[in-house]
Amino acid sequence: MKFLAATIALAFAATAHADHAFTLTNRCPGAVNPVVADTRCGFSPRCGDASSFTGAQPGSVAPGTSKVVNIPNNWVGRIFNQNGACGAKGDGCTMGEFNLDSGDFFTPQSYDISNIQGFTQSMQISAAGCATVTCTNANCGCANAFPIGDTTGCGNDSPVRACGAGNIAFNTHLCSPPQLCSALKYFTKIYAFNAHLGSLVFNIGNSWVVSAFDSLGIEAACAMVATFFYNTEIALDKDPVCNMFRVVRL
């Protein structure tokens, strides 16, 4: 699944007017449009003590580049990639959810990945000194994200990660890092797996692609490619929309 190679790396650092600096890094092959959306007094029950984001939206972020957005202390909200089909608050799309500086003794900062309203790309969120959470496909279990259509909170909020108080550095990837094939290496030719014919088809190009059924996992795809190229290494990611594996440079 194409890890919308859009990495939103969110690094929280204190500034004069904002306690958290989010560094948004795009690791996708195309531009992304990350949006910072408030959920206080609405999607989130937290209201009076929560801050609103009043800064400029990051706008378009080119592949391989980053932007820094200052987020106020006590913010509660979402970050998502506006692909043209997401609602104003990320409705219908994959999103990262944040509850900052809550004052809670056990979870002063909390974050999670949610696909409840729809899966649109892979995502990874990490925080300095705290746990990393990654969702690479629409079938992520509760250990990694709130699943599509889930309204139970996974029963115990298991997708939620917690971090201590203070200006902690966060890294969030819209389009998480590619899954790696063990003992394989990337290539620069294009191959396509014809799902109907069940065969690999050679195409000339600058990168190469292996398309497959959703049921074909990353290791199976790696093994299939390894059958044709020995003693080399590849990294694959998978596009959830066109259902295609793509070889990426490490």
Image (cartoon, helix red, strand yellow):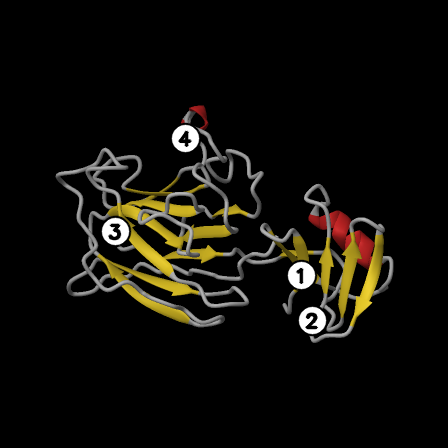
Instruction: Residue 166: give its label.
Output: 3
Callout 4 amino acid: Asp
CB contact under 8 Å: marks 1 and 4: no
- Can residue 59 be seen at all in this image of the molecule? yes
Callout 3 amino acid: Gly
Query: Which label lies toward us, 1 or 3?
Result: 1
Q: CA distance from mark 1 to mark 4?
A: 33 Å
Q: Is residue 12 above or below residue 160?
A: below
Query: Which label lies toward us, 3 or 4?
Result: 4
Q: Residues within 10 Å of mark 3 (few under 14, many from 20)?
A: some
Query: Which label lies toward us, 3 or 2?
Result: 2
Task: Compare residues 106 and 96 and report the one nearer the observer.
Answer: 96
Label 4 belongs to which residue?
157
Q: Is residue 128 above or below residue 105?
A: below
Q: CA distance from mark 1 to mark 3?
A: 39 Å
Instruction: Residue 173: give its label.
Output: none
Task: Compare residues 44 and 110 and report the one nearer the observer.
Answer: 44
CB contact under 8 Å: marks 2 and 1: yes
Residue at the outermost left position: 48
Instruction: Please tell me which of labels 1 and 3 falls first in the chain.
Output: 3
Q: Quadrant of residue 169?
A: bottom left
Q: CA distance from mark 3 to mark 2?
A: 43 Å
Residue shown at the point (73%, 45%) measured from the top left:
216
Query: Which label lies toward us, 1 or 4?
Result: 1
Instruction: Residue 207: give its label.
Output: 2
Q: CA distance from mark 3 to mark 4?
A: 23 Å
Label 1 belongs to which residue?
246
